[in-house]
Every structure is written in C-alpha cells, then in structure tokens.
Amino acid sequence: MRACVIGAGLSGLAATYALKNRGIEVVCLEKAPGIGGIWRQPQAGERGPGYLSLHLNTAKQLTGYTDFPMPDSYPLYPRHSDVAAYLGSFARWTGVLEHVELRTEVLSVQLHADSTWTVLNCHAHGAVASRRFEHVIVASGHHAEPALPDPLPPGSDAFAGTILHSLDYRQGSDFAGQRAVVVGLGASAVDIAADLSRHAAYTVLSVRRGLHIVPKQLFGTSVDEIAEASWWNAMSFSEQRRFVEQALLVARGSLADYGLPEPDHPIFSSPVTISDEILSRIRHGAVTPKPAIARFEGRRVVFTDGTSVEADIVVYCTGFRMAFPFLPPGCPTGRDGAVELYRRVVAPDRPGLYFIGLVRPVGAITRLVEAQSQWVTRIVAGEATLPSQDVMRAEITAYLDVIAERYGSAQGASIQVDVGPYLRELREMINV
C-alpha cells in the first residue's frame, strides 16, 4: 500500500483526509475503539491525558478543519465531548472513516533497504498482521508516558494519602470532601485545580516555577486569532513580546498579587499557560497557591517555605515524555532528547517517514496539521521533492539552535513553533 497513518486523532484524520483527497491509497491505524484521540477518552472512561472538565483553549473557528467548520451551535470554546462528536462527523462526512482500522495497535515500524516500511500491528482479537508501505505518517501525539519528578520528595513512599499523575485523573467529584494538592502550573494543573476546588474540602496549588498565565482572550479577541492576525505577524518578536506583556498587566495584573511566583523569564521564553479560570479561583479563595513540595510527613505535605497542609490526594500535573515505542531507537529524537525533524515533519535519514502534529504552538494547531498534511501529500504524490540529508540536517541544527537560545534545551522546547511564521513556511513549500 502507498501510505499508513498511525493515530486517528485530530492530526491523523487531517493526514488521512489529505491523502485520500488526492486519490492516494491510505489506511489509518488506531489502537483505541473510537476516533478522536484525547477528546474522546474522558467520556469513554479510558485512561489518558483527558479529563471530564477538558475544554478547548483555542477558538472553534480556528480549531475546526478548513473544509468542515465546527457547528454554529457550539460555544467559542467547546468541551471535549463536543470536539469528539465533531471529529466523528468530519470522519464520516469526508469518508475518512472507511480508511480507519480501530482497535489496531502498531507494534513496530521497520525500514527496508528499498526504502519501504513494514508495519506490524495487533488487532483487538489478538491476531498480528504485517503490511508493507511506501510511506508512514506518525500522528499519534506526544502525550505518551507520564512524567513524575525523579525522585519524588522525601517521604512520598510513606504518604498516607493517594499520589497520582494527571493521566489517572478523571473528575473532581471523585474526591469530594477530600483535601487536595495539585502540583504544577501547566494547562492540566490549572484545569484540575479549578475542577477539584468545586468538590474538595480545600485545594492547594503547589508551584515550583512561575509561568506566564494568559487568558483565552485579550481585548475581546481569542489569543489564537491574534497569533494568526496579519497585524500581529507584521510585528518583530520584541514588539510582540512587549505588546503581550503590557496587555497582561492590564488584563490580570501581577501574578505575585495572586500569591503565585513571578516568572523568571520573559514571555515566549517557555510555554505559556492559557486559562481564564485559575486566577479567579485563587481570588475567590477556592485555590491556595503554595511553593514546591519539600517532603511528605505521614498525611502532611510540607512545602519549601516551611508551611504544610494535611492532604488526602496529591495530583502531579508534571507533563509527559514523548515516546514512540514502535519506531526504531533514536527516532525522532537525538541523543540529547531534542526532536530532530526537517521542517518539524520529515525524518531526514529515514525516507518515507513523516510526523504530523508533533509541534506545540501558542494557538490552534489545526491549520498547522492541515498544512503539514498537504505538504506530505505532495511529497507522497511525487509533486514535491526533499533536499539532501545534509541540507535537512543543517536546517534542523539551525532551528534547534534558535529554539535553545529562546527556550532552553528541554525536550519539549524542540517542538515549539510560532503559528504565523511556521504556517507561512509550510504554505510556501506547498505552493512551490
């Protein structure tokens, strides 16, 4: 067969649609019993990064596919079940669903000397199948393995309460009346803390390092719409940074006023946290900020400032490690853990292997995965060619140097992209 897409979430459906639309033979393999990825998991009761209070942080008009907008009846920021239903409607409307094999887990992907790939997969009934493809497109996301502090604070092994990762969190009512501590300040941390605060006896938010918290809208406009606006992209990076810093002072003031640590870095030097809710919950006394956890003592959680609280549950919202166990070792990451892909899509030394959606934008990802899919489709169709491996590696090195200077060398930093410039870059390659 010509092409295999791994994963039937938002990115995988976009890739399958682009290939199908060009008449390219394609199959999409999805290990879950349904399509939709993270958006279908909460309602299905499956273990995963999603939880029942999960909503979009990006506006529906930019998160929906270009050829199939989200319904007018949807709110600006739909909840997970709305997004899951929308993705199902898209798959049926486009005919993509006919190309999806559910309950099909990819076990391995192997490159051969003739530049074809063997994909070994296991079906729900246990049968293992092997198929040969010319191209493999990985669209399985990057929320793979839960990342916990290593080591956990002293005394955690004897903690009398429950310690879990956000991957195992479903809803706040599961912990009604309990005393909760949430660790982190990323998207899942602020969502889960706000959700718990409506059910728990009290909720503490433990924050080791300050992050920039950005509301979903500035001046009445969704921040993802701003990220794609022509006036925004006409600004220099320093002008963009200054604009947002001033806007945040107007919109929410200083984070120190909420009891949170001020970020030790300028905005856009690390991922931002988008939330309309957490600062309000703090202001209303429903969530209490605390510094990092120093140690556990029985059922007591002691913080680095010497204060402590009794806790029944501690939820670590400390992110995920990227993992692609079905791929050859070292792909797509190098020895330092950075993702090494030409134009954030192509594995330079593995012809025929591509990644869709392995990026982290400040804004909606849908336009990006659509453009990535269109470019890959042109490559598969023979309408676009790739440069030499040396040229691709040089581009990767130059990009990672810029990223490291701006964000540091953490693994997650290597997948950061600016929506406007990256979208222009992809569209230029599509139109060559």
Image (spheres, rainbow, N blue to C red):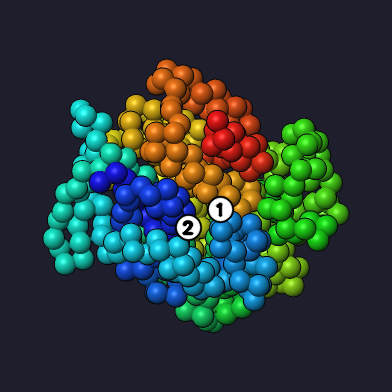
Q: Residue at x 68, y 68 (%)?
A: 76
Residue 293 percent coordinates (x, y) = 54, 55
Residue 23 picture location, percent across and down: 38, 49
Q: Pick the residue in front: 351 or 270.
A: 351
Query: Residue tagged by mark 2?
Result: 10
At mark 1, the secondary structure is helix
| Left or right of 181 on screen, residue 419 | right
Circles 2, 1 touching at the beta carbon (< 8 Å): yes
For the residues labelled 2 and 1, the Cα–Cα distance comes to 8 Å
Residue sitting farthest toward the front? 23
Marker count (numbered): 2
Give the residue type at disc 2.
Leu
Q: Earlier in the sequence, mark 2 or mark 1?
A: 2
Residue located 37% across and 64% down the image: 97
Q: Where is residue 375 in the image (x, y as percent from the top left)?
A: 48, 39
Residue 92 makes an appearance in the image:
yes
Q: Mark 1 is on which residue type?
A: Thr
In the displayed structure, would residue 104 be above or below residue 430?
below
Question: Badge 2: few (under 14), some or many (20 or more) residues near its Cα, within 10 Å?
Answer: many
Residue in view at x 80 percent, y 51 percent: 248
Quadrant (top left/top right/bottom left/bottom right) for the C terminus? top right
Circle 1 sits on which residue?
Answer: 366
Q: What element carries label 2?
A: helix
Q: Residues within 10 Å of mark 1 (few under 14, many from 20)?
A: some
Residue 233: quarter of image: top right
